[in-house]
Amino acid sequence: MELRRKRAYDTAESSDGFRVLVDRLWPRGVAKERAEIDLWAKDTAPSPELRKAWHAAPDDEWGTYADRYRAELDGETAPALDELAAELKQHGVVTLVYAAHDEEHNHAVVLEAALRELL
């Protein structure tokens, strides 16, 4: 299986395969029809508290945020992560869709790494 990441504001393409929105909130200004989302895995997104902390102080250490999110994925979010991994195994190409502007410092990067370990 091939696992990719893509911003929700980028055009959906057939080559994206199975598209999974991995944000807890729907991306602002993106029509559901245009997004072409096959699955909304909001239960695997960072907790509201962690998301708010990251947005309140985005200049904080990226590693600290990533570590805190990974701890959530390994703890309270583990059942949702396992369920998502089981679903993704059924598809040849999967694209994790997220709204963050920074393509390298966002929760989808951490989630992708966690999924790769399970897949």
Image: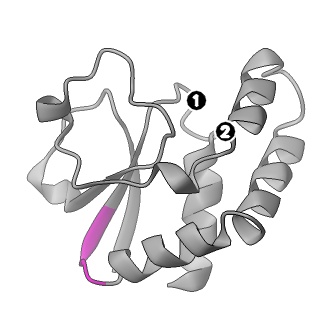
Q: Amino acid at mark 2?
A: His
Q: Which mark is residue 17?
A: none
Q: Residue at x 62, y 40 (%)?
A: 106
Residue at which label 1 appears: 102
Residue 96 location in percent, x, y?
A: 40, 53
Does residue 115 appear anywhere in the picture?
no
Q: Residue at x 55, y 62 (%)?
A: 112
Q: Which residues are magenta?
A: 90-94
In screen coordinates, is 56 left or right of 32? right
Q: Residue at x 11, y 33 (%)?
A: 33
Q: Count neighbours of disc 2 (C-alpha within 10 A) and say few if under 14, some if 14 to 19, many if 20 or more.
A: some
Residue drawn 19% across the image and 32% down it = 32
Q: Please identify the dominant SS of the magenta region.
A: loop
Q: Quadrant of residue 99?
A: top left
Would you call the spot at circle 1 few (<14 residues within 10 Å), some (14-19), or many (20 or more)? few
Q: Position of residue 63 (x, y in %)?
A: 85, 46
Quadrant of the rendering where the N terminus is positioned? bottom left
Tag 2 and tag 1, C-beta contact below 8 Å: yes
Q: Amino acid at mark 1?
A: Asp
> What secondary structure is found at the residue carrying circle 2?
loop
Q: Is residue 94 left or right of residue 82?
A: left
Q: Position of residue 71 (x, y in %)?
A: 82, 61
Instruction: Residue under label 2, please give it.
Output: 105
Q: Determine the secondary structure under disc 1.
A: loop
Compared to residue 73, the image places residue 48 above or below, namely above
